[in-house]
Amino acid sequence: MAIICKSRDKNIKSFCFVHIYKTGGNAIIKTLQKQLQGKDVNFNLRFTSPHCSLRDIKDKMINQQINPDNFLFFGFVRNPYDWVYSTYYYIKKSPGHEYYNTPQVQNFNEFVKWLFTHAYKLPKIKFQDQYSSQSAHLISKSGAIELDYVGKMEDFDNDYKYICNQIGLTYHKPLAVNVLSKRDQKSFKGEMSEKSKIMINNNLHDDFINFDYQKL
């Protein structure tokens, strides 16, 4: 999903936030809304459909005669193992989710197998192959990741502080949205099998390379 902000304030730079699911995006959106209150900007929360790519975003901007060169583009990523596990745990804990009752969602290793061999083949926009990695969300038509800045969940506050500085906003600590309680904060480390590790390594290879994460 793309959040674009077209600024008429000379002290605030126009920007586009490329939101990859399960990377802290909702916290960033809520915080930006608060920071931009009263500012002379057009903040568009629904510029694109959910889970689109940078390529889709720039195409739509050009079609609407919006020059992408006038915008700061940024996004956030996270460790690929954590990204898959967070997706799994979110679905497992969300009765309203369309895949909540899928049998494979009850076990992490079954979920990994289902995710990469079946789910990404489903005719749902958020599970199409082109969105099956974090890299795929951020690739432009040239095949390169052409964002001005890619933040990491592992250094969330500092990276968001840097982005605020680039935009021209006073830093506010990101608001907590969809945050699990400490009791529910679990890790892939205690549940991931060797087969699941290999499957994640193979399917998300580009994420490990592009964002400098180490494979186990």
Image (spheres, rainbow, N blue to C red):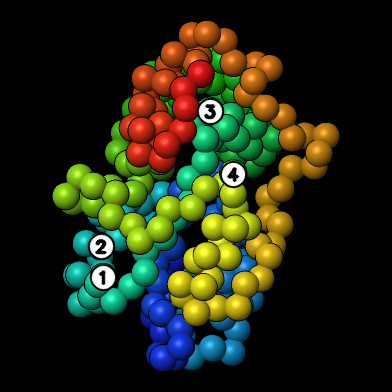
> What residue appears at the point 46 percent right and 83 percent down from the top-left corner?
12
Residue density around tag 2, few if under 14, some if 14–19, many if 20 or more, within 10 Å: some
Around disc 1, counting alpha carbons within 10 Å, would you say few (fewer than 14), some (14 to 19), or many (20 or more)?
Answer: some
> Which three-letter amino acid code belongs to the residue tagged 2?
Lys
Callout 3: SS: helix
Q: Residues within 10 Å of mark 3 (few under 14, many from 20)?
A: many
Task: Judge by depth and name the residue closer to the eye, 151 or 75.
Answer: 151
- What whole-number distance in Å separates the C-alpha atoms at marks 4 and 3? 13 Å
Q: CA distance from mark 2 to mark 3?
A: 29 Å
Q: Does residue 116 appear in the picture of this structure?
A: yes
Comparing labels 4 and 1, the label whose residue is closer to the camera: 4
Q: Nearer the viewer, mark 2 or mark 1?
A: 1
Precedes in sequence: disc 4 or disc 3:
3
Q: Amino acid at mark 1?
A: Pro
Mark 2 vs mark 1, CA separation in Å: 6 Å
Q: Tell which of 104 and 186 is nearer to you.
A: 186
Mark 4: secondary structure? helix
In the rendered view, does 119 fall on the left or right side of 164? left
Residue identified by numbered label 1? 68
The circle on residue 154 is: 4
Q: Quote the CA–CA distance across marks 4 and 1.
A: 28 Å
Q: Amino acid at mark 4?
A: Glu
Circle 1 sits in a helix, a strand or a loop, which is it?
helix
Occupied quadrant, residue 183: top right
> To which residue does mark 3 refer?
81
Tell me if 184 is positioned left or right of 190 in this view: right
Q: Report if the CB atoms under discs 2 and 1 are less than 8 Å apart.
A: yes
Residue 118 falls in image quadrant = top left
Position of residue 146 measured from the top left corner of the image (x, y, whole percent): 28, 55
Front label number (2 vs 3): 3
